[in-house]
Amino acid sequence: MTPVLEMRPPAAAPKGVLDVAGVGVGPFNLSIAALLDHVQGIEARFFEKKQKFAWHQGLMFPGSILQTSFLKDLVTPVLPTSPHSFTAFLVEKKRFYDFLSGRFTGVTRMEFNEYLQWVSGRLESLVFGEEASAVRLDGNRLRLEFAGGRTELTRNLIAGAGMMPFFPPCTAPHVGPDCFHAGTYLSHPRSFAGKRVAVIGGGQTGAEIVLDLLTRSEGAPAHVSWISNLARFSPLEEGGFVDQVFTPGYVSAYQTLNDDARRSEISGQKLASDGITPITVDTLFAEIYRRRHLMGENCISLLPGRNLEAMDRQNGSFLLRTRALPSGGDEFYNADIVILATGARPALPACLEPLRSRMDLDANGLPVLDASYRIQWDGPAGVSLFGLNLGLSSHGIVDPQMSLMAWRSAVIINALTGQDVFDVSAGPELVDWPKRLPDETPMTRAAS
Ligand SMILES: Cc1cc2nc3c(=O)[nH]c(=O)nc-3n(C[C@H](O)[C@H](O)[C@H](O)COP(=O)(O)OP(=O)(O)OC[C@H]3O[C@@H](n4cnc5c(N)ncnc54)[C@H](O)[C@@H]3O)c2cc1C
């Protein structure tokens, strides 16, 4: 394998001290590990609590399609010659020609997971079955403590522990076998036979679960209520101009904006990443049409524009109170099972709690990141904490998804090594995104 850079000789770290440790091996840290495999002189280990790589298994429906191009894999956007690419996977699995013959508009999440697993089996820097329980400062090093009592010393750390499932506050007292987060939908098989099921959340996950409930050959529910606080069940915004949001150039323009403008960008671009994949919309709509008009079944209530406000247990089932948006009227629905397709929120991984008081935190209590994903804190010079899935505010709508995953990994590796190992500069942008120039006044922008 050709190294992509002439690295300085291995860092003069005392024996037994890692240059960098990663907490969690999801796609994001896996991408960093795959790119670091090309970088000499960096002692890295990535620790994952699961026994082997697995990507959102609880939602791995056989037909679910990746919302991102397979070319935006772990490595290709910054190192297309890497043997850890999706194309290399297809070639090694002897399915390259069949894959092309398929003329697929998208890759299934199942196949992308297989690719991710394949890469995870090729990297020596990954350690499975190790749960990081705490990170503490130990002189000018970080001490990573594991659930089993073992420790590792490292000079830098990359937090890649994923996001926290979000439970609407009124659901908290009821969470259990009959009220659960969508993330566990397939990992704990349940019977829905003859039950009234409420699915809360109108995004891709909610849509996939509703589709699964309506098309079950066995154990189909009696009725599904699909409740969403969005004004309608909206498809993902797609197309060349939308995809321009998922470019390094967009991120750098976004980073010039003030907090108010950033918030408005994030909400304005929401459907570019949170909408429902068009093929899921079409399949689901056709199924609902068939059941309602051809079979004469009242199998589903479509309830957008409603916020779940309250939930009570009554005679063994749930009574849900929703508030219609924007009229404010209350409505009530009964359900035997409530599935919370309510997404996940960024959160500081629990193991970093010992260092929280030393971090700059934003209004949401999340660490502030610089442009290189470094958590801003008052630790010693040369000891960096990097945050994955913590940069919605600092890097915009691209942060929680995989479109710029390899680019982000390259930015972090450049910061880690202090060298331009990878070219992460933005090319000439097609779209001139709104920016706030450092000394901008309305007149200077208009005149330029
Ligand atoms: C169902 C679903 C489908 C998605 N599809 C797409 C898509 O098509 N395109 C797209 O761009 N984005 C998609 N996303 C969004 C995003 O790409 C994924 O959420 C992605 O998995 C984020 O990767 P991650 O590495 O940050 O986190 P995760 O995948 O959540 O991985 C974090 C890992 O950290 C481990 N961990 C946590 N705490 C510890 C600890 N203390 N010690 C050790 N290990 C720990 C966890 O076990 C886990 O394996 C999807 C998200 C979901 C939920």
Image (cartoon, rainbow, N blue to C red):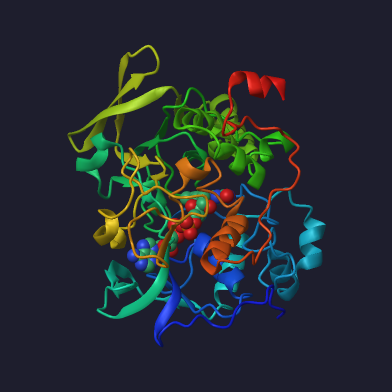
| Residue 140 sits in quarter | bottom left
On the image, the x and y values in percent for residue 177 come to 27, 50
Residue 97 in the image: above or below residue 149: above
Nearer-the-camera pick, 161 or 367: 367
Residue drawn at (46%, 30%), measured in percent from left and top? Answer: 300
Residue drawn at (73%, 66%), measured in percent from left and top? Answer: 87
| Residue 256 sits in quarter | top right
Nearer-the-camera pick, 402 or 323: 402
Residue 146 in the image: above or below residue 226: below
On the image, the x and y values in percent for residue 192 come to 37, 45
Nearer-the-camera pick, 424 or 37: 424
Q: Is residue 7 visible?
A: yes
On the image, the x and y values in percent for residue 335 come to 31, 34
Residue drawn at (45%, 32%), measured in percent from left and top? Answer: 259
Residue 67 in the image: above or below residue 430: below
On the image, the x and y values in percent for residue 129 come to 38, 75
- Is residue 11 left or right of 282 when viewed as pictured? left
Q: Is residue 23 visible?
A: no
Q: Quadrant of the N terminus?
A: bottom right
| Residue 227 sits in quarter | top left
